[in-house]
C-alpha cells in the first residue's frame, strides 16, 4: 500500500468572479521513502495540492470539493481540525518557500522549536532542549546552542531553512512536503539543502514530496515526477524516463526552457525555447485540453474533451494525458 | 538597548529647543498689540509705550526670546496679562485636568478599539466585522465638536443619564465618582476618531498576522489555534498597536482641547481658548509649550516601549 494516495482531488476557491478551480482532479501516490516532485509553473496548483494534503487550504474561500486523500489507508478529506492536528506535524510536515518569513520574528528559534516539540505529547523542558539540539545536529548545524538562543533575523537564509527542516523533522513525520524549499536561496546553498533533504530521506526513510518549478531539483533528488498544468497532472513517470523522453508537449517545453537540459552534442548555447501565450483562466477552463491554445501539436480533437491517460512506455510507469504524445517524441 | 535609549533621550533636547522657538515666534507673530489690548483703545500713546517697556515688548525679537527662554528654564512662566497672577498657578491645575481627560479618552480608545478590532479580526467578514467596520469608517470621519454636541444632546438633555458639562458637581466637593461621571461623555467624544483608527488597525494587523508565513508554519506543525492566536498573533500585533497608540495620544490631546470648550471642562483647551481671545501672550505661550512637551514625552516613552519589544533593536 502506498503511503499517500491522492485521487481525483479538486480544490476550489470561491471568489466574486466565480469558482477558481486551482486543483482540478489530481491523482498520484507516494510510497514509503520515495521522493516525488510536483513540477509546474506558477498558478498550476502545485502548492495548493500540498496545502490540501495537510488540511491547510486557505480559508475562508478555499474548499476541497471532491476526491480522496488516503494517508496510510485513511481518508483525510473531511477530517475536523482537531483530528487533523494529529496528522499535521506528527505524520506529515511541511516546509515553505521563504525561510525568512516562515518563523515568528518575535521569539527565539529555541522558543519556537520547543513549542513545536512539546506540542506532541508530554515532553519536559530539558528533554525538548536535548531533542532540539539533536535535530539541529542532524540538519548540519554545528553550534546548536547559539542558534537556539538566536532570533530568526540573526541567521542566514540557508541556516534558517536548515532550522525549518529541523522543526519539520521534530515529530518524525512519515511524509515531508517541501514547497519550493530552495527557491529563495542562492545557488551554493540550494545544493546544500538538496543534499540535506537527500540525506534525511536516506537516514530516516521519510518520504518527500517536493513542489518546484526547477527541473534541476528534480534531476538531483527525485525518484518520480508529476508535471502539473492548470490544476491537472499532464504527465507522470520516473525521473529518468521523463527527463530523457518527455512525451507531453508542455513538459518538453518546460525542459526546453532550462539551460541545463539542452540537447547534448549541440555546440554552444542553443536558443532557449519559450512557451508562447499564458495559462488559461482557472475560472473558465476550456472543455478540452487546457494546454490547447499554447500547443504546437493541437488539433480539433484536443478542443473537444480532456484526454485520458495513456501509457508512454511498455512497463507502464510513465503516463501522459495527451492525444498526440506519439508525435511529440 | 541602553545606548539606543540614551541616544533617544538626548535627541529630545534639540527637539525641545526647536519647539520653544516655534512656540515663541508663532505667538509673537500674532497680530495685535497686547499693550493696547490691556489699556483699551482709548489709551494714550505714552501709556502704551510705557506698558510695552514694562512688558519687555519694545526689545528686539531675539532678546525677547532669550529672556523668555531663560525664564522658562528657571521655571518662571511669567505673569498672566489679563489675570495678573503667575501663569503656572493657573496652568498647572488646568494641565492636570486636561491630562485626566486625555487619559479617559485614551482608555476609551484602547479598550473600545482593541476589543472591536480583535473581535472583527478574529472573524473577518462576519456580520460583526462588517457592522463594526462600517461604524469605524463613520467614526473616523466625524468632527469631534459635532459629536460632542450630539452626545450631550442625547445622553444629557434627552435621556438625562450623564451630566452635560463641567468636571464635577459644583454643589459638592469633587469626588472621584463625580469626576468619572463627568468624564464619560467628553472622553467618548474626544476618543471617537482614535477609537475608529485603532479598531481598524487592530483588525488589519491581526488579519495580516493570520495570513503570515509563520502562522502557516505553526499550523503545518499542528500547533493549537489557541497558541497561534494568543502567543504568536497577539505578540506580533503589539508593535503596530503601540506605535499607533503613541500617535493617537497626540491627537487625543488635540481632540480634548476642542471637547473641553464644548463641555466646559476646566482644562488647557478652555483656558487657551479664553487666553487667545484675550491676547494673554504668556499664558498662550506656556500653554502651547505644555502641550508640545507632553507630545514629545509621550513619543519618547512610546519609542522606548516599541524598541524594547523588537528583538532587532533590543540586541
Image (cartoon, coloured by chain):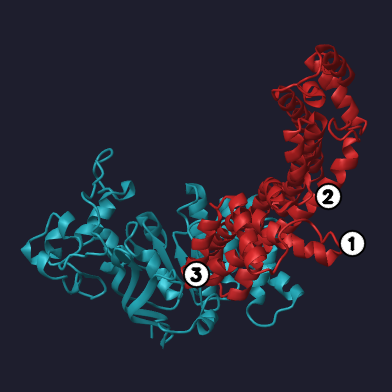
Chain colours: A cyan, B red
Q: Please, is residue B261 above or below residue A226 in the view?
A: above
Please tell me which residue is depicted at 82% across the width and 61% down the height of the picture: B169
Q: State the residue lying farthest toward the front.
A: B42
Packing grade of label 1 (10 A; few <14, some 14-19, many >=20) is: few
Q: Are marks 2 and 3 in contact (CB under 8 Å)?
A: no
- Res. A246 in view: yes
Q: Along the line of sight, which residue is nearer the eye, B39 or A248?
A: B39
Q: Is residue B18 above or below residue B110?
A: above
In this rendering, the label closer to the viewer, 3 or 1: 1
Residue at point 82% right, 23% down? B39
**Relative to B32, is A28 on the left or the right?**
left
Q: Is residue B201 left or right of residue B305?
A: left
Residue topped by disc 1? B173
- Tell me, for residue B43, which label it has, or none: none
Say which element carries label 2. Answer: helix
Chain of the residue under the numbered disc 1 shown in the image: B
Check the image and name the residue furthest to the bottom.
Answer: A73
Residue A124 versus residue B234: which sits nearer the camera?
B234
Q: CA distance from mark 2 to mark 3?
A: 68 Å
Are the residues flagged by discs 1 and 2 from a single subunit? yes
* Secondary element at tag 3: helix
- Give the left or right position of residue A263, taking residue A298 as reference: right
Q: Is residue A222 above or below residue B88?
A: below
Name the front one of labels 1 and 2.
Answer: 1
Q: Which mark is residue A201?
A: 3
Residue identifier under label 2 = B96
Amino acid at each position: 500500500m502506498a503511503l499517500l494516495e491522492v485521487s481525483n482531488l479538486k480544490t476550489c476557491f470561491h471568489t466574486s468572479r466565480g469558482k477558481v478551480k486551482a486543483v482540478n482532479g489530481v491523482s498520484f501516490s507516494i510510497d514509503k521513502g520515495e521522493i516525488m516532485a510536483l513540477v509546474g509553473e506558477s498558478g498550476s496548483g502545485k502548492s495548493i495540492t500540498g496545502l490540501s494534503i495537510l488540511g491547510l487550504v486557505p480559508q475562508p474561500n478555499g474548499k476541497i470539493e471532491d476526491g480522496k486523500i488516503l494517508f496510510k489507508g485513511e481518508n483525510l478529506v473531511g477530517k475536523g481540525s482537531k483530528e487533523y492536528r494529529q496528522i499535521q506535524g506528527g505524520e506529515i510536515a511541511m516546509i515553505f518557500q521563504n525561510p525568512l518569513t516562515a518563523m515568528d520574528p518575535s521569539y527565539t528559534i529555541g522558543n519556537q522549536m520547543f513549542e513545536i516539540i512539546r506540542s506532541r505529547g508530554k515532553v519536559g523542558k530539558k528533554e525538548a532542549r536535548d531533542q532540539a539540539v539533536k535535530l539541529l545536529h542532524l540538519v548540519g548545524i554545528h553550534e546548536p546552542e547559539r542558534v537556539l538562543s538566536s532570533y530568526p533575523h540573526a541567521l542566514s537564509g540557508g541556516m534558517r531553512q536548515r532550522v525549518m527542516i529541523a522543526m519539520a523533522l521534530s515529530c518524525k513525520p512519515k511524509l515531508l512536503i517541501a514547497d519550493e524549499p530552495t527557491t529563495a536561496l542562492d545557488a551554493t546553498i540550494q545544493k546544500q539543502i538538496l543534499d540535506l533533504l537527500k540525506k534525511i530521506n536516506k537516514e530516516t526513510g521519510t518520504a518527500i514530496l517536493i513542489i518546484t518549478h526547477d527541473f534541476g531539483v528534480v534531476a538531483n533528488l527525485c525518484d518520480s515526477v508529476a508535471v502539473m498544468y492548470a490544476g491537472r497532472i499532464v504527465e507522470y513517470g520516473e525521473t529518468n524516463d521523463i527527463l530523457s523522453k518527455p512525451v507531453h508537449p508542455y513538459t518538453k517545453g518546460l525542459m526546453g526552457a532550462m539551460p541545463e537540459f539542452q540537447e547534448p552534442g549541440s555546440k554552444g548555447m542553443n536558443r532557449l525555447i519559450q512557451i508562447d501565450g499564458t495559462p488559461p483562466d482557472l475560472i473558465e477552463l476550456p472543455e478540452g485540453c487546457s494546454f490547447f491554445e499554447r500547443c504546437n501539436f493541437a488539433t480539433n480533437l484536443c478542443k473537444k474533451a480532456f484526454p485520458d491517460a495513456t501509457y508512454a512506455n511498455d512497463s507502464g510507469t510513465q503516463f501522459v494525458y495527451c492525444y498526440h504524445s506519439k508525435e511529440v517524441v | 538597548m541602553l545606548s539606543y535609549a540614551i541616544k533617544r533621550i538626548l535627541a529630545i533636547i534639540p527637539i525641545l529647543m526647536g519647539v520653544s522657538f516655534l512656540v515663541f515666534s508663532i505667538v509673537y507673530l500674532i497680530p495685535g498689540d497686547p499693550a493696547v489690548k490691556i489699556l483699551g483703545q482709548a489709551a494714550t500713546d505714552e501709556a502704551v509705550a510705557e506698558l510695552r517697556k514694562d512688558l519687555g515688548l519694545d526689545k528686539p525679537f531675539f532678546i525677547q526670546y532669550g529672556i523668555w527662554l531663560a525664564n522658562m528654564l528657571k521655571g518662571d512662566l511669567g505673569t498672566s496679562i489679563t489675570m495678573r497672577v503667575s501663569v503656572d498657578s493657573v496652568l498647572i491645575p488646568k494641565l492636570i485636568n486636561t491630562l485626566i481627560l486625555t487619559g479617559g479618552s485614551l482608555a476609551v480608545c484602547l479598550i473600545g478599539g482593541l476589543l472591536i478590532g480583535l473581535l472583527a479580526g478574529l472573524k473577518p467578514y462576519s456580520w460583526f466585522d462588517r457592522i463594526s467596520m462600517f461604524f469605524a469608517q463613520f467614526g473616523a470621519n466625524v468632527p469631534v465638536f459635532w459629536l460632542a454636541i450630539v452626545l450631550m444632546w442625547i445622553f444629557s438633555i434627552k435621556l438625562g443619564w450623564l451630566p452635560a458639562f463641567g468636571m464635577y458637581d459644583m454643589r459638592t466637593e469633587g469626588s472621584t465618582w463625580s469626576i468619572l461621571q463627568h468624564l464619560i461623555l467628553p472622553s467618548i467624544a474626544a476618543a471617537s476618531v482614535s477609537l475608529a483608527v485603532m479598531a481598524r488597525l487592530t483588525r488589519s494587523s491581526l488579519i495580516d498576522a493570520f495570513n503570515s508565513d509563520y502562522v502557516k508554519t505553526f499550523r503545518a506543525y499542528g500547533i493549537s489555534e489557541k497558541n497561534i492566536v494568543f502567543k504568536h498573533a497577539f505578540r506580533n500585533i503589539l508593535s503596530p498597536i503601540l506605535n499607533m497608540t503613541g500617535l493617537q495620544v497626540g491627537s487625543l490631546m488635540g481632540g480634548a482641547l476642542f471637547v473641553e470648550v464644548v463641555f466646559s471642562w476646566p482644562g488647557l483647551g478652555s483656558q487657551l481658548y479664553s487666553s487667545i481671545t484675550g491676547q494673554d501672550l504668556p499664558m498662550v505661550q506656556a500653554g502651547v509649550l505644555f502641550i508640545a512637551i507632553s507630545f514629545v514625552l509621550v513619543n519618547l516613552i512610546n519609542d522606548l516601549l516599541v524598541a524594547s519589544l523588537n528583538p532587532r533593536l533590543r540586541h
